[in-house]
Image: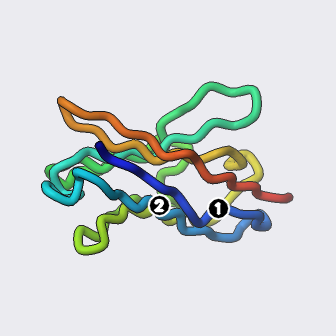
């Protein structure tokens, strides 16, 4: 079983930056973060959960149009950690951000971390 714990959320002014982290523990140690696919999702108040960034096991990345050029997803295999660097934050980026790790036989979610961007 895999456990994911997010951290790094908080309150920031528009134009600022935050770095979210997602630390994985449990059976993921056996295979390492590199063998999983990783997603960051977000859910704003009253909105559906939406994918923000994806990091595939082969190293490919994909970003939602609304964060392209501002957000970067990365991983540190030695630390079993995946990051989301968020720059040039906007008030509309305010949401709870969730880390998700999956492979064909497994799917895990973190508890979420709140990001609030003030105007």
Question: What residue is drawn where x is 39% and y is 59%?
Answer: 73
Q: Position of residue 111 (x, y in %)?
A: 55, 45
Q: Residue at x 46, y 47 (%)?
A: 99
- 86 relative to 3 in the view: left or right: right
- In this rendering, the answer to whether 54 lies above or below 70 is above
Instruction: Determine whether the residue tagged by mark 2 lies in a helix, strand or loop.
Output: strand
Q: Which residue is mark 1?
A: 9
Where's residue 48, x and y in %?
62, 25
Rendered view: 26 above or below 50: below
Of 48 and 109, which appears nearest the observer? 109
| Closer-to-camera residue (86/6) | 6
- Indicate the quadrant containing the N terminus: top left, top right, bottom left or bottom right: top left
**Picture quadrant where residue 30 is located:** bottom left
At a point 68% along the width and 45% down the height, the residue shown is 95
Across and down, in percent, residue 93 comes to 67, 49
- Looking at the image, residue 65 sits to the left or right of residue 90; the answer is left
Distance from the alpha carbon under mark 2 to that under mark 1: 10 Å
Which residue is under mark 2?
Answer: 84
Which is in the foreground here, disc 2 or disc 1? 1
Colouring used for the render: rainbow
Mark 1, secondary structure of its residue = loop
- In the rendered structure, which disc, 2 or 1, sits on the residue that comes first in sequence? 1
Task: Answer with left or right where residue 65 lies relative to residue 107.
Answer: right
Where is residue 86, by image quadrant?
Answer: bottom right
- Quarter holding the C terminus is bottom right
């Amino acid at each position: 079983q895999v456990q994911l714990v997010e951290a790094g959320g908080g309150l920031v002014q528009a134009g600022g930056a935050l770095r979210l982290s997602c630390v994985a523990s449990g059976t993921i140690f056996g295979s390492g973060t590199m063998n999983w696919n990783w997603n960051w999702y977000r859910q704003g108040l009253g909105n559906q959960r939406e994918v923000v960034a994806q990091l595939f096991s082969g190293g490919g990345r994909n970003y939602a149009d609304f964060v392209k050029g501002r957000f970067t997803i990365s991983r540190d295999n030695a630390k079993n950690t995946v990051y989301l660097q968020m720059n040039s934050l906007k008030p509309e980026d305010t949401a709870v951000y969730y880390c998700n790790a999956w492979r064909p036989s497994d799917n895990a979610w973190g508890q979420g971390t709140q990001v609030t961007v003030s105007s």
